[in-house]
Image (tube, rainbow, N blue to C red):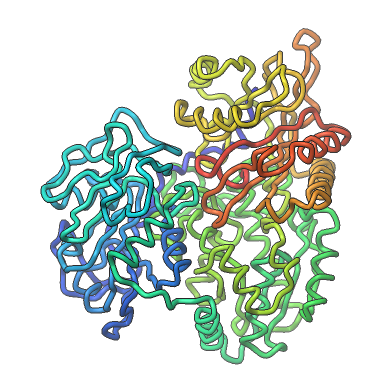
Amino acid sequence: ARLARGSVGCSRIVGGKVGARGCNRGAAMALCNGDSKETAGGDIKDARHQYEGAVVILDAGAQYGKVIDRRVRELSVQSEILPLETPAFAIKENGFRAIIISGGPSSVYAEDAPWFDPAIFTIGKPVLGICYGMQMMNKVFGGTVHRKNVREDGLFTINVDNSCSLFRGLQKDELVLLTHGDSVDKVAEGFKVVAQSGNIAAAIANESKKLYGVQFHPEVDLTEHGRDILKNFLFDIAGCSGTFTVQSREVECIREIQKKVGHSKVLVLLSGGVDSTVCTALLNKALNQDQVIAVHIDNGFMRKRESQSVEEALKKLGIKVKVVNAAHAFYNGTTTLPISEEDRTPRKRISKTLNMTTNPEEKRKIIGDTFVKIANEVIGEMNLKPEEVYLAQGTLRPDLIESASLEASGKADVIKTHHNDTELIRKLREEGKVIEPLKDFHKDEVRALGRELGLPEDVILRHPFPGPGLAIRIICADEPYICKDFAETNNILKIVADFSASVKKGDCRTYSYVCGLSSKDQPHWDSFIFLARLIPRMCHNINRVVYIFGPQIREPITDVTPTFLTTGVLSTLRQADFEAHNILRESGYSAKISQMPIVLTPLHFDRDPLQKQPSCQRSVVIRTFITNDFMTGISATPGNHIPEEVILKMVREIKKIPGISRVMYDLTSKPPGTTEWE
C-alpha cells in the first residue's frame, strides 16, 4: 500500500539548517578554527563568575541538545546552553565548572561545519563531547574522522572500559543509543579508546586532562545507564554540587513574568492540557487576577466532550475561562506560503483552506496562524489595546527544538513545525509580545512545577494533547504516493523477516516509509518489537513499524481513500479516540502510558483487486508511548508494559465503528519515529 503524497508534503526539509555559520544570537564575535576575537558572546552575562559552579552546554545543533540540559538540571546542577562558537575566555570568566558539547547534524570536515574556539579544550575545564562533540575533540588533537560505510542508528550494545572515570560502576556491556554516520578513524595522541561498538570507537578519553568523548547519547532514556555516566562526569570528574531545584526556578520564572509584563494584561490560550494549565497557574501567582485573561479556543478538532471538561476542570482551580467556538474559522482558515520550495524571493501565495489541505506542515501553519487571528479578535471584542496585551503560551522546549527555533537551538534541523512556533508566532516573539514562562522546561519538570503550584494530580498527570488536536492525527491524502525505492525496500523486507505482506507509507518526519507487519498466527510481541528495532537499521528509508491486527494481508493496496479534515472524518477519529482512551482509563494503566495518540490513515485493506472495489474505508493506528522527557521513548509492549487484553479490547471496540477497515499497533521507538505521526 502507498499513502498519499499529501501525507508526505511537497518538500524535503531534512537538510534545511538554521544559522549554520557564524553568530546567530546577537553575539559579537568571529571564530574560525580557533582564531577568537576578544569580544564577549551575546548570550553571556556581563557579571564575572555569573555561573560559578554551573555547566555550559555548547550547542552544535543537536535535536537532543535540550535533553542534555534537562538531564543536568535533573541532577540539580545549574546549566546554560550557549552557541558552539562561544569563546573560551568567556566560559572561563563566567565561572563555568565544566563543558559539555552536544551532538549535531554537521560533519567536522564539511565546509559549513560550525565554527568554534579550540581553546575550550585547553582552559583547564573538564569537557564531555557527545557525538559530534567527540569528533570535534578528536580532530582538534590530531585525530581523524571518516564517514563509514555503515551508519549506526538505534540501540546497540557497546563494550566499555569501566576502569575509566566516566564509566565507573557500569557493566562491561552497556545498551546505548547511537545515531551517526561519521566515526573516529585515527584516535588523537594522548587519548585512548574506552568503549567500542564492534570495531568502531564509541568513546575516547584523556584522563589526565579530564577530556572525554562519547559517540553515543548518554542523555536519552534509551541509553540504559546514561544518567550514571552524566553523574560520574558532573560530580566525580567536574566536582559540581547539586543545589539547582524546581523551587528556585519557580521564583525566577515569577520574577521574569513580573518584570516583563508590568501592569499590562496577558491573554493566555488554554488547551486544558498540563502545559497551558501550569502556565496559567504560574501567571495567576505572578500577577493580579484581573491581568490574566484565560481563553479556551475550540478549534473543532477537540476530542469528544473535551472543551466542556476543560472548562469544568479549570473552574475548579479558580481560573475563569472564556470559551470561543471557532470551528468554522479553522476549517476555512488559510495562511501565506512561499511560491515554491526553490523560490527564495519574498513572494508568497495563499494556501488552500484547511479542510482541503493535505500537507502536514501547511496544516500546522494554518492552525497556528488561525489561533493568533482568533486571539486578536478576542482582544478586539474585549476593547483591549493590542499593544498593551501580551500573548502567553505553554510552549515547552521540545516544541522549539523540533521546530528548529532559535529560542532553543540556532543549528538544529527542522523535524516539524509546531502550531505554537509558526512564522507569525516568531514575529510576535521578535516584537517581545509573547510570554512563554515554560520554554526552558520539559514535560516532567512542568509536572513538578505544577505540584509546587498546588495543582491536583488528575490535571498534572493528564495525557498531553496537541494544540492542533485531531487535525494532526488524521493523515490527509488525495492520491497514492510511491518513491522509486519502494520496490527495492519491499524486497529487502522480505529478506529481513518472513512476513511477505508489508505495508509502507509516507511518514512526515523524514519522508520515510512505514513498514506494516501482518501474520497468520497470534502476535509474538517481543519478536515484533525486535523487528521494529532491526528494520529501520537495515532500511534507512523506513522509520516506523506497525503491526496490523486481523488475518494476514493478502492483497497489496494500490490506492487510498480520499481524506480531508471534514466533519465526517473527524467524527470517525473522535469516536475511535474516545473508545480507546475509555478502555485505557478503565484498565487502570493510564498513568503507566505517557501518551496514546489514535491516528486515522486513508488505507482500506482486504479488497479483491479483480472486483475493482473502490477505496472507501480507513484504518486506525494505536500509538502507545512511554517516556520521561518526550524527546525519546518506546512503544508499550503488550503483555509487558500493558496487558494484551487491554489492547485487544481497544481493537474490538474500534472495529465496531462504521468505516474502519483495520486497526494497527505502532511498535516504533523515538527515534526513529516521532511521538505523533504528523
Q: Quadrant of the C terminus?
A: top right
Relative height, residue 265 to residue 574 (above, below): below
Residue 391: give x, y in percent of width and height.
62, 74
Report the side of 612 relative to 193 (left or right).
Answer: right
Taking the view exactly as shown, the residue that stands out farthest to the top is 610
Near-viewer residue (215 or 504)? 215
Which of these two is toward me, 219 or 29? Answer: 219
In the picture, the quarter occupied by the N terminus is top right
Looking at the picture, how far across and down is residue 494, in whole percent? 54, 15
Location of residue 578 with respect to 526 vertically, above or below: below
The answer to whether 428 appears left or right of 242 in the picture is right
Q: Residue at x 81, y 59 (%)?
A: 306
> Residue at image x 75%, y 32%?
663
Image quadrant where residue 598 sits: top right
Could you say where residue 270 lies in the image, as x and y percent from the top left?
71, 69
Q: Is residue 478 left or right of residue 57?
A: right
Above or below, 488 against 529 in this view is above
Name the residue nearer the viewer: 563 or 555.
555
Q: Is residue 505 visible?
A: no
x 55%, y 51%: residue: 337
* Residue 612 visible somewhere in the drawing: yes
Q: Is residue 362 left or right of residue 581?
A: left
Q: Where's residue 427, x and y in %?
A: 51, 67
Q: How many marks?
A: 0
